[in-house]
Amino acid sequence: MITLDRRRIAVFLAGASAFLDMYCTQALLPDLAEHFNASPAEVGLTVTMATLATALVAPVIGALADMVGRKRVIVAGALALVLPTLAIALVDSLPAILALRFLQGLCMPAIFTVTMAYVGEEWPPAQVPEAVSVYTAGTALGGVSGRLVTAVAADFLGWREAFLVLGAVNLAAGLAIWVLLPAAKGFRPSDSLGSTLRAAAGHLRNSRLVATFGIGFTILFSLVATFTYGTFYMAAPPFNLSTTAQGLVFLVYLLGMVAAPIGGRMIARIGPVRGMAVAVAGVCVGQILTLVPLLPVVVAGLALMVCGIFICQTASISTVSTTAKTSRSAAMGLYVTLYYVGGSLGAVVPAPAWHAVGWPGCVAIVVVVALAGLGLAVRFWTPAKASS
């Protein structure tokens, strides 16, 4: 029981660590835009660079982990993330920050891609949705902590100092994962890089997996679009929220810690397709509520949307874990690539709609993308278990 508890705590911390830095600049976008005299689209690239780097390197990290093991890759990624985070505090140009954000993104797949594969191998298939929900709950804590830590530190200390604080938190999390995460018992190394790449190619011939990769795209696109342009929406009239106040709004992310376990149990009971339908309905209704120009209603809409997103995430990760029978890190790497391509585009694609019609344009885009994800689930998530 002690090993099991340590394992769950470590998986939770890995989820938190992976997402602590991913969106840490979202709460700082108005400050960065003012400091560098940059447009929303330009400072929005601080989100895009991290997600783009993650998308590019995830399959490589997955292949590496399929050969050398799980724990060492997870811990290495968590500790390596400290250096570029601290370095952001020392530079004074937007291009330099973008380069360091790209370096941060290169470290992150070692944490979450491999942790998701670890879950798929260390828990029995029937328990995977619940175990994934522990990881997903950790991502909720990491997402809100990254935004809140940087927002509060920026208001009281300055935006540079915010990254020093964040780097210290990264270090503590990496050391805790190192101590708590048991060595993998279900891991079976691939014979060579070639065999791993052949297995990855096999995943691309599995329609159920490919559809799930596409669903991952829609999930992060929706989340990043909402909170990137929502930052500017809430900084403008009639809300006029300060950086700290917006950081407090991001506390709705904590609902993911509740929604993910509930979603895991719901998916196990009613199946992933119906679970996705419930979750996407929450995303769409939540988006529509944010159009009401009253802060409590906007916050309620964001809360509903976040709950739906985290249930979608639990459903999609569980599906990858139970569908891929071999080279799970490679499968997770492919999922993460599409997931973060979606996140990268979510930070920039709504920009023309934002400039043309404001927040309603962003809402329309997110609703369409979320419904497209549900369409993929309905079409390809059949009850039969596919193999790769």
Image: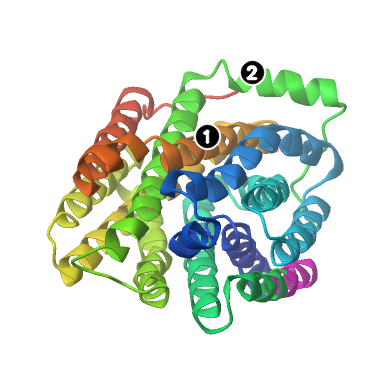
**In percent of the image, x 21 and y 63: which residue is there?**
298
Q: What type of secondary structure mainly makes up the magenta span?
A: helix
Q: Residue 341: which numbered mark, if any?
A: 1
Say if residue 126 shows up in the picture.
Answer: no
- Which percent across, then down, holds residue 251? 39, 72
Sequence-wise first label, 2 or 1: 2
Q: Report the residue marked by disc 2.
A: 202
Tell whether position 22 is magenta. Answer: no
Q: CA distance from mark 2 to mark 1?
A: 21 Å
- Which percent across, then down, holds residue 223? 39, 49
146 vs 214: above or below: below
Number of marks present in the image shown? 2
State the quadrant of the N terminus. Answer: bottom right
Tell whether position 173 is magenta. Answer: yes
Residue placed farthest to the bottom in the image? 156
Task: From the viewer's side, name the closer residue of 343 and 328.
Answer: 343
Q: Residue 211: which numbered mark, if any?
A: none
Q: Is residue 371 left or right of residue 341?
A: left
Q: Nearer the viewer, mark 2 or mark 1?
A: 1
Amino acid type of disc 2? Gly
The boundaries of the magenta stretch are: 171-181
238 vs 129: above or below: below
Q: Is residue 11 left or right of residue 320?
A: right
Amino acid type of disc 1? Val
